[in-house]
């Protein structure tokens, strides 16, 4: 009897072991399926070396060490009228996303696509031409060499990827003006012609629920007051609305979004890195956004046409490091100072040139549309001006 019981026990152990092995196999197959449906579809590129990334060798060591506390990523939205092609076309949208590893705060900077910068080999062009001349690697190198940054990671998307991502999280709610509604409806056929979708036109203004195509068209508007500066602001409004909606979405919606867009992006993040950052999405908070350059003017140059000219690029870079990395009194590298001097010489734009006031478009956090952004930034500027005035009055009374 005892011998028979031992055989029964061994039999039960074999059955349990077999069941465990089957369950383990199913888990592995499930993981492989999920990978192939999502991360396995990503167009991965090789990582960038310091040299390939164009990181300036003369950046101050302490400043470089400080930047190592942040994940800095270049985001490129392509205007190539085709799906899944990442080696051609201008970068219609250029953003720098910076994640503070400690606080999990995210800051976004739009680099105006028409900004006059060095493209290497002594050439000066609009910032968006760098991508057309050498893809993401050339565009990243352009950002690093002109702005004293240490970006080695990038993500590239086209229109369809943005459309599908917004649709999969259920769309986004934005305040739409009459001028914006007209422009969205004008742009819908062009985006539908690229994606193959058939999208309804907007019929009203105010707070509207936008699907992927409508929101993408909103992000492309430039033929209203504010031109490309306001378009860059709209792009940040859409991005932060997507982040807010993604944080509220269930796992099914997020999985569906990943399945749809992973085959439509090009990046040099590894699969493990994507999983690492995606799993922590609920921890991220958008702190502030802005456009770059901070001080600028525009000119019609014979070589580039209508162009955004930084007023003292070196000073703009110093302000950028203050904004992104809380680096007070940042001293740009000699490389950036040299580029700044050459831009001044080529354009005649100096530190004394009058700058456009773009403060109303800058910080989009907390706004669900352009009018809300303008009002919020106007109130903030008035508060800042009042504080300066009060401080000045107090100083004079003390004397």
Image (tube, rainbow, N blue to C red):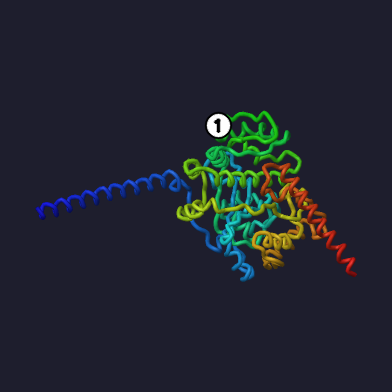
Residue 342 visible in the picture: no
Q: Where does the image place residue 96, in percent across and percent down from the top left?
A: 62, 54
Between residue 32 and residue 338, name the one nearer to us: 32
Nearer-the-camera pick, 233 or 123: 233
Regarding mark 1 in the picture, which secondary structure is present there? loop
How many numbered discs, if any? 1
| Left or right: 357, with 148 as reference point | right
Residue 80 appears at what percent x and percent y? 59, 42
Q: Residue at left 72%, top 59%?
A: 316
> Vertical placement of 397 versus 346: above or below?
below
Q: Is residue 306 left or right of residue 280?
A: right
Side (left or right) of 2 relative to 216 = left
Q: Which residue occupies 47% across, 52% down?
A: 275
Please, which residue is most extreme toward the front here? Answer: 1
The C terminus lies in quadrant: bottom right
Which residue is identified by label 1? 197
Q: Residues within 10 Å of mark 1 (few under 14, many from 20)?
A: some
**Which picture quadrant has residue 143?**
bottom right
Q: Where is residue 99, by image quadrant?
A: bottom right
Location of residue 233 in the rendering, given as x and y in whole percent from the top left corner: 69, 46
Residue 348 horizontal/vertical position (percent): 80, 57
- The answer to whether one can see residue 161 in this image is yes
Q: Is residue 183 above or below residue 94?
A: above
């Amino acid at each position: 009897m005892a011998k028979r019981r031992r055989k029964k026990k061994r039999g039960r152990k074999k059955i349990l072991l077999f069941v465990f092995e089957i369950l383990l196999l199913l888990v592995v197959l499930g993981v492989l399926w999920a990978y192939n449906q999502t991360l396995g579809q990503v167009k991965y590129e090789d990582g960038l070396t310091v040299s390939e990334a164009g990181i300036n060798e003369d950046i101050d060591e302490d400043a470089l060490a400080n930047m190592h506390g942040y994940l800095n990523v270049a985001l490129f939205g392509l205007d190539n009228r085709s799906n899944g092609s990442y080696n051609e076309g201008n970068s219609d949208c250029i953003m720098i996303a910076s994640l503070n590893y400690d606080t999990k705060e995210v800051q976004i900077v739009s680099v105006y696509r028409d900004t006059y910068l060095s493209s290497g080999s002594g050439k000066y062009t609009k910032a968006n031409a760098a991508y057309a001349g050498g893809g993401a690697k050339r565009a990243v190198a352009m950002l690093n060499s002109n702005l004293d940054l240490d970006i080695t990671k990038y993500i590239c998307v086209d229109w369809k990827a943005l459309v599908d991502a917004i649709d999969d999280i259920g769309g986004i709610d934005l305040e739409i003006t009459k001028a914006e509604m007209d422009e969205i409806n004008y742009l819908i056929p062009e985006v539908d012609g690229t994606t193959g979708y058939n999208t309804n036109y907007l019929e009203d203004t105010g707070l509207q629920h936008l699907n992927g195509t409508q929101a993408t068209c909103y992000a492309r508007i430039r033929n209203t007051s504010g031109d490309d500066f306001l378009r860059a602001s709209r792009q940040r409004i859409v991005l932060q609305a997507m982040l807010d909606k993604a944080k509220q979405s269930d796992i099914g919606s997020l999985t569906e979004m990943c399945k749809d867009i992973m085959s439509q992006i090009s990046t040099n993040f590894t699969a493990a890195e994507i999983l690492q950052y995606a799993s922590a999405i609920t921890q991220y908070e958008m702190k502030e956004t802005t456009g770059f350059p901070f001080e600028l003017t525009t000119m019609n140059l014979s070589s580039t046409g209508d162009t955004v000219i930084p007023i003292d690029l070196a000073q703009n870079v110093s302000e950028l490091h203050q904004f992104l990395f809380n680096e007070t009194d940042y001293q740009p590298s000699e490389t950036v100072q040299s580029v700044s001097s050459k831009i001044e010489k080529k354009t005649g734009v100096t530190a004394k040139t009058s700058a456009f006031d773009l403060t109303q478009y800058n910080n989009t956090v907390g706004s669900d549309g352009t009018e809300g952004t303008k009002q919020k930034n106007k109130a903030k500027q008035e508060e800042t001006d009042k504080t300066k005035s009060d401080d000045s009055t107090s100083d004079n009374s003390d004397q």
